Amino acid sequence: MTPRLVFDIGVVALDAHYDAFSTVDPNNPLDDPDRSGDPLPDSPNLALNLGLSYHWLHDQGVKTGVSANYRYRSRVYFSPYHDEAVMQEGHGVLDIGMDIRGQKERWSLSLFVNNLTDELYARSIVRVDPIVGTTRFWGEPRHFGASLEYRF
């Protein structure tokens, strides 16, 4: 057996703010229209991705692997108005998986669980008062699956 451990890391640090920008918030038209210094929409200060995988080869030519991936995003606003109603707090999502591949990779079996901890988070939030109010588009809840592949 030949084991192999791989660790991946990705880090993004942003300081994305308006230098000078004015626009009237249609949901709060009496608010100050100056958005200077406010964060840009959907721009986290920190995004982090951590991955860990372990693979090994069996004597019969079968390859096995397990993996885990964690991704984190700090707080974001989904509009230019720095509105708490369209803000998503920082959150992290953990995915895990395993796979088995036959000799010469003619066949493979993969299993996965995404969002293992069933983290509830918004991918987007739209506020349109008074027509529809605030609508949240949620990230996928915990889900799992498998794939079986054969090449000939």
Image (cartoon, helix red, strand yellow):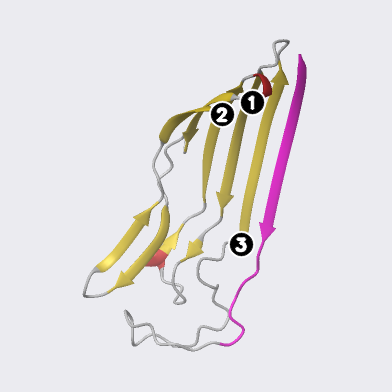
To which quarter of the image does residue 39 belong? bottom right
Residue at image coords 76%, 20%: 3
Whichever of labels 1 and 3 marks the residue nearer the N terminus, that label is 3
Name the one closer to the observer, 42 or 34. 42
Quadrant placement of the C terminus = top right
Whole-Å distance between the Cαs marked 1 and 2?
A: 8 Å
The x, y position of residue 22, in whole percent, is 49, 89
Q: Secondary structure at mark 3?
A: loop
Residue at image coords 61%, 23%: 101
Instruction: Give the farthest residue toward the front.
Output: 152
Report the residue marked by disc 3.
Answer: 45
Specify start and end residues of the magenta stretch as a single range.
1-20
Instruction: Give the farthest residue toward the right.
Output: 2
Whichever of labels 1 and 2 marks the residue nearer the N terminus, that label is 1
Report the residue marked by disc 2.
Answer: 151
The x, y position of residue 122, in whole percent, is 41, 55
Quadrant placement of the N terminus = top right
Magenta stretch: helix, strand or loop mostly: strand
Whichever of labels 2 and 3 marks the residue nearer the N terminus, that label is 3
Residue 142 against residue 139 in the figure, above or below? above
Report the residue marked by disc 1.
Answer: 105
Q: Verify whether residue 151 appears in magenta.
A: no
Residue 26 against residue 95 in the figure, above or below? below
To which quarter of the image does residue 52 belong? top right
Whole-Å distance between the Cαs marked 1 and 3?
A: 41 Å
Mark 2: few, some, or many residues within 10 Å (few <14, many ≥20)? Answer: few
Q: Amino acid at mark 3?
A: Asn
Q: Secondary structure at mark 2?
A: loop
Name the one closer to the observer, 149 or 143. 149
Mark 1: few, some, or many residues within 10 Å (few <14, many ≥20)? Answer: some
Q: Nearer the viewer, mark 1 or mark 3?
A: 1
